[in-house]
Amino acid sequence: MTNQAPVACEGVAPLTARTEPWMEDVLGDAQQCGSLISEFGSPVNVLDFSPLARNAAELVDAARGEGVRLGVYVARKANKALGLVTAANDAGLGLDVASLAELRQCLDLGVRGEAIIVTAAVKSRELIRLALDSGALISLDNADELDDVVLAASGGERVARVALRLASTDPSIAPTRFGLTSRQWDRALAEVDSGTLRIEGIHFHLNAYSAAERAIVLREALSWTDRLRDQGHRIAFIDMGGGIPMSYLADGAQWGAFWDGVDKDEHGTLTWRSDRLGLTDPSAARPSGSLYPYWQRPVRGGWLRDVLRAPGSERESIAAELAARDLELRCEPGRSVLDGCGMTLAEVAFRKSTSDDIPLVGLHMNRTQVRSTSVDFLLDPRWVRPAEAGEPSPAFDGFLVGAYCVEEELILRRRLRFKDGVARGDIAAFMNTGGYLMHILESASHQLPLAVNVVRGADGAWVHDGIDKPA
């Protein structure tokens, strides 16, 4: 390892990322970072899935402490690397797949069909057939999909394993495009040959991260479980989907200070042309739902305990309700179990200013390569300067821009402070991007290549993951 003093880079209002020891080992070796860029191109996604089992165990242990069995099905869509499938399978976890390709990859990598749930929002007939053939569980979303599954199952000597996706009717829960109400499902099931179906569970999907809302819909699902069992269905689990919170930041005080600053920022001191980044309530000085809460408490295990300790309808807690019915609780975490599993490295291409003198740093990447569905990525990058980098500029404050030919091609919409200047050949390291941020919106527009994904091999070397690898 070639250790080197860190190069200063932080937001004008800092938002410092939490890191894992493996990340610090990589960042502390500037030549290794440079070699990764040289070998695999810019940007390169660097992945070490060793934290995944630990993160999942935190959830399982929290549930066990409340007397509840928890099944963890890792959201495959959260990161497309094949290494995620292997790591989840090795840890004894299930997989949640959202496409035919994801299902095929899991099966090809040795995942048992019984350990897979198919939750794709739109399911092709080919996906349904492979799910049936492999024994995977299908989360049914609507009556037309139900018809497709019954038709596919009736064509062979097989019974479809399904869960019914529930859309809550509680007035405190936001309307959803996912699933049907329990009464709608009752009507839909009455129209089909139920002999081709084995209804094993209830599934639901909620936006955002509210423990209280999960408890509300769990109570609704528990009541529906009783009705379905009275009808002869052997309901074994309730699956509450994903949305388990995590925190990206090392210091929660920075989160509050940043939003206080955005509220008062009239001159673009903190953000690109005074962009408020979803801040709609100045009195709260916090973002709207359009931006991920990079700092929140509780997270993971503590959050799950809050869900399970919420009051039940008949017993003192949701946990007691689940245990009394001998129901397994299931979840489909993505971001929260991939916490600490990845970072993205990108090389500096140029330094310049806009026509109105706003300093810019251009990177060999585009904004879709470090972005989820929220407004912006809100972590300070770490800065690495390999020996072969050019001469650094004087210190300045500026913004990171990317490769797409549009005015709003900002990698981050936050102003950064480069106290040690910027050199061509420097490397920006975006922290903790393993959950969704690498891939959920990734685009190859302009025919630019997708980022290569590398994982740590058994010998400690970084190797091509295999996903998107040329034949």
Image (cartoon, rainbow, N blue to C red):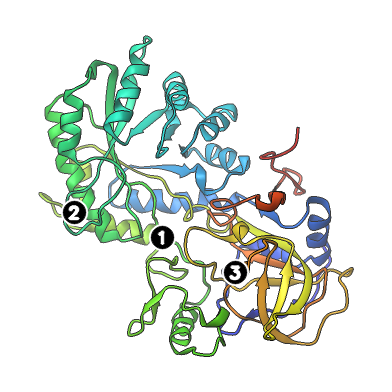
Query: CA separation, marks 1 and 2?
Result: 21 Å
Q: Name the residue type under label 2.
A: Ser
x and y, in percent, of residue 205 in the image: 33, 47
Determine the residue positioned at 30% across, 24% down.
147
Q: Between tags 1 and 3, which lies in front?
A: 3
Query: CA separation, marks 1 and 3?
Result: 29 Å
Within 10 Å of the Cα at label 3, are there few (<14), some (14-19), or many (20+) other Cα atoms?
few
x and y, in percent, of residue 326 in the image: 23, 37
x and y, in percent, of residue 213 in the image: 25, 57
- First in sequence: mark 3 vs mark 2: 2
User: Where is 47 relative to 8, above or below?
Assistant: above
Res 408 label: 3
User: What is the count of numbered marks?
Assistant: 3
Local SS, label 2: loop
User: Where is 41 relative to 146, above or below?
Assistant: below
- First in sequence: mark 1 vs mark 3: 1
Between 209 and 192, the residue placed more toward the observer is 192
Decide if residue 55 is on the left or right side of residue 346: left
User: Where is 180 relative to 436, above or below?
Assistant: above
Determine the residue positioned at 45% across, 65% down.
292
Between 249 and 447, the residue placed more toward the observer is 447
Local SS, label 3: loop
Decide if residue 220 is on the left or right side of residue 331: left
Q: Which residue is label 2 attached to? A: 317
Determine the residue positioned at 51% across, 45% down.
77
Q: Name the residue type under label 1.
A: Pro
Q: Between tags 3 and 2, which lies in front?
A: 3
Determine the residue positioned at 69% across, 80% down.
354
Q: Name the residue type under label 3.
A: Glu
Query: CA separation, marks 3 and 2?
Result: 49 Å
x and y, in percent, of residue 337 in the image: 49, 52
Q: Which residue is label 1 attached to? A: 245
